[in-house]
């Protein structure tokens, strides 16, 4: 069984297009989108349309990210990221915010052997494998996970940093991000799982795309577009 997992698209249709082309070559049996679909500035409206088309075509399992939750919040004077959210609501298709905000926090695949979430399996805001600026301890990770039943692999996103760890029989993976890299390499990321039952292989993949075109779109159209453009081109951000 092959499972393609990607996430943190952050409204970057240029990076998403490259990742989808790469994934298609592997002919996965299942696709998983870990969330944070549109909170970004490299054509988020088209990025949302592409992800909806992907769901219809392949039955992609979609998970709610923390910025997806933001898009379901009412805009008030005290709303965090209010200006960015107002811009997103002005360019996204009607109902897009409500849709991504209503997605589940986790999915189970391969008879429960593979679990996927955005931050943790229950909280999109909490990074499973991070403790501030450092990697979390095994004990912290296990406490955040709780009872996993017969699961053998857990895959998350949120931190935008690729990571793999083995704790006993459990393999833990952060697949990295499609967009808004933090490690100085702007390439888009995704993960391929291959296996069945208790045995799985994890392959990290990086995909080059036209960061110049993405940055130009952001600089010309997005809220705080110059900042977005710099991160897309340098692979360095918050």
Image (cartoon, rainbow, N blue to C red):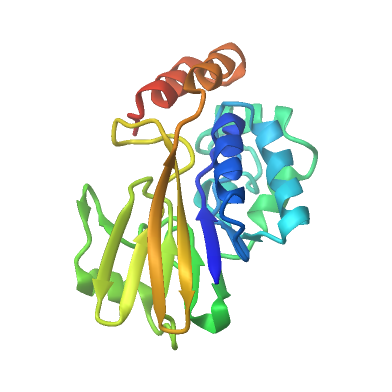
Point out residue 183 in the picture as x, y percentages from the top left corner.
29, 36
Q: Position of residue 12 (x, y in %)?
A: 57, 32
Q: Nearer the viewer, residue 232 or 110?
A: 110
Along the line of sight, the residue nearer the viewer: 238 or 53: 53
Residue 96 horizontal side relative to residue 38, left or right: right
Q: Quadrant of the C terminus?
A: top left
Q: Name the quadrant of the N terminus.
A: bottom right
Answer left or right for 69 relative to 45: left
The location of residue 166, given as percent across then percent down, is 26, 71
Give residue 182's quadrant in the image: top left
- The answer to whether residue 39 is visible is no
Give x and y (percent) for residue 27.
61, 57
Relative to 65, does residue 189 appear above or below in the rendering? above
Q: Name the residue rendered at 63%, 44% in the picture.
A: 71
Q: What residue lies at 21% left-to-right and 74% top-to-bottom?
A: 139
60 to the left or right of 130: right
Q: In the picture, residue 77 is in which quadrant?
A: top right
Residue 183 placement, left or right of 220: left
Q: From what the image shows, is residue 134 above or below residue 226?
A: below
Looking at the image, residue 56 lies above or below residue 151: above
The reply to whether residue 236 is in sight is: yes
How many marks overall? Answer: 0
Residue at x 68% of width, y 46% of height: 51
């Amino acid at each position: 069984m092959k499972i393609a997992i990607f996430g943190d698209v952050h409204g970057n249709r240029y990076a998403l297009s490259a990742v989808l082309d790469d994934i298609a070559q592997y002919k996965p049996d299942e696709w998983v989108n870990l969330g944070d679909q549109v909170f970004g500035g490299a054509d988020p409206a088209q990025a949302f349309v592409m992800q909806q088309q992907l769901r219809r075509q392949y039955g992609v399992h979609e998970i709610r990210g923390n910025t997806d939750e933001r898009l379901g919040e009412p805009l008030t004077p005290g709303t965090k990221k209010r200006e960015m959210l107002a811009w997103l609501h002005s360019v996204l298709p009607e109902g897009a915010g409500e849709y991504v905000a209503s997605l589940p926090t986790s999915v189970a695949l391969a008879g429960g052997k593979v679990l996927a979430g955005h931050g943790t399996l229950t909280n999109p805001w909490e990074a499973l494998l991070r403790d501030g600026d450092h990697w979390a301890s095994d004990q912290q990770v296990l406490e955040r996970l709780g009872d996993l039943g017969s699961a053998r692999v857990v895959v998350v996103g949120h931190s935008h940093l690729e990571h793999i760890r083995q704790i006993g029989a459990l393999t833990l993976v952060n697949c990295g991000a499609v967009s808004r890299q933090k490690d100085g390499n702007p390439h888009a990321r995704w993960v391929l799982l291959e296996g069945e039952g208790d045995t799985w292989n994890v392959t990290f993949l990086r995909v080059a795309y036209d960061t110049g075109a993405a940055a130009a779109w952001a600089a010309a159209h997005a809220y705080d577009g110059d900042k977005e453009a710099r991160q897309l081109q340098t692979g360095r951000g918050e």
